[in-house]
Image (cartoon, helix red, strand yellow):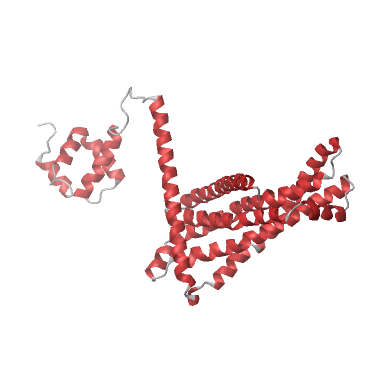
Amino acid sequence: MRGRLDAATRVELAELGTLDTAGARLLHGLLGGERVAALLADEGALSRERRALLKAVADAIEGREERPIGDEGYALGDVLAHIGHTMLVFWRHVTSLTGFIGLILETALRVSVQPRRWRMTALVANLERTGLDAVPIIALLTFLVGAVVAFLGATVLQNFGASIFTVDLVAYSFLREFGVLLTAIIVAGRTASSFTAQIGSMRANEEIDAIRVLGLDPIELLVLPRVYALLIALPILTFVAMIAGIVGGMLVSATTLDISPVLFLSRIQDNVGLIHFWVGMAKAPIFAFLIAVIGCLEGFRVQGSAQSVGEHTTSAVVQSIFVVIVVDAIAALFCMEMGW
């Protein structure tokens, strides 16, 4: 009778050795779809694991999971579904980031009252990598940007006979915005990716699981030294960026506008208040904390493959730069409204 197994087939299947995907594909070709369906319905013919494998192969061959012909979907519905999925993913990112920040703060408070648990060696090592090694690139890039800002300001202001205000333009821009913003963006691309790759590689190699088995806290061991190092390094790098940018602007002013360095510095002292310096420096710890948290969080999200490490490293850089720019814009509007 069609769709049923005979006794000979049952005996042969009972003597079947190992069954892999290729074997299941061959078995489907030999028996045909109807006999395979009967085989799947007969619980005594094959073991549970082999029946599950054979069913998956049969479904793939017969195209049971494919979309029915003529079901092209609805364009507007697909767009709305995509928007909803994107918002859901964004909300999950926000909630996980918030929870991770709370976990870091709780661990930091718990460790702060136990000096013997402070990881000073890890702190110094991360401080060297995130701070000292980044000084040359920060200084060079901000020096060049300062020179470009001064050149553009001189080109425009010279037409109005106000070349001297190039000094104010360079000082204001680097003390309030460019110094900390350029530094944070460079650090986000350089350090956040490094944090994600390091922690992600440890997760892929199951080293983080080994740390937990040993009774150690990965947050205390891996995250806190990186967060503390960046909290120390980024304000210092911001100060270096401010000085380098102003020096670049001063060099252009001296060569193209005949504004001597003494006059340049004197005008900054007379016309630029110290509040602008503190506004720029106050943003540095906030940016440092956010960059470090995002970099470490993306490292813990790695699933265990090299591809996952690369994807989360890219995601850490994109998220860090996005958050830095958004927070800087909000801070700029707030300070402007407050008159600072």
Q: State the residue lying farthest toward the right.
A: 258
Q: Position of residue 10 (x, y in %)?
A: 13, 44
Residue 28 falls in image quadrant: top left
Q: Quadrant of the N terminus?
A: top left
**In the image: residue 6, left or right of residue 304:** left
Q: Position of residue 72 (x, y in %)?
A: 36, 24
Q: Is residue 13 above or below residue 216?
A: above
Residue 57 falls in image quadrant: top left
Residue 209 visible in image: yes
Q: State the residue lying farthest toward the top.
A: 70
Say which of 72 and 78 sits in front: 78
Residue 304 visible in image: no
**In the image: residue 128, left or right of residue 77:** right
Q: Is residue 304 above or below residue 60?
A: below
* Residue at horizontal 15 percent and vertical 48 percent from the top: 14
Q: Position of residue 305 (x, y in %)?
A: 44, 53
Q: Position of residue 195 (x, y in %)?
A: 53, 58
Residue 151 falls in image quadrant: top right
**In the image: residue 297, left or right of residue 247:** left
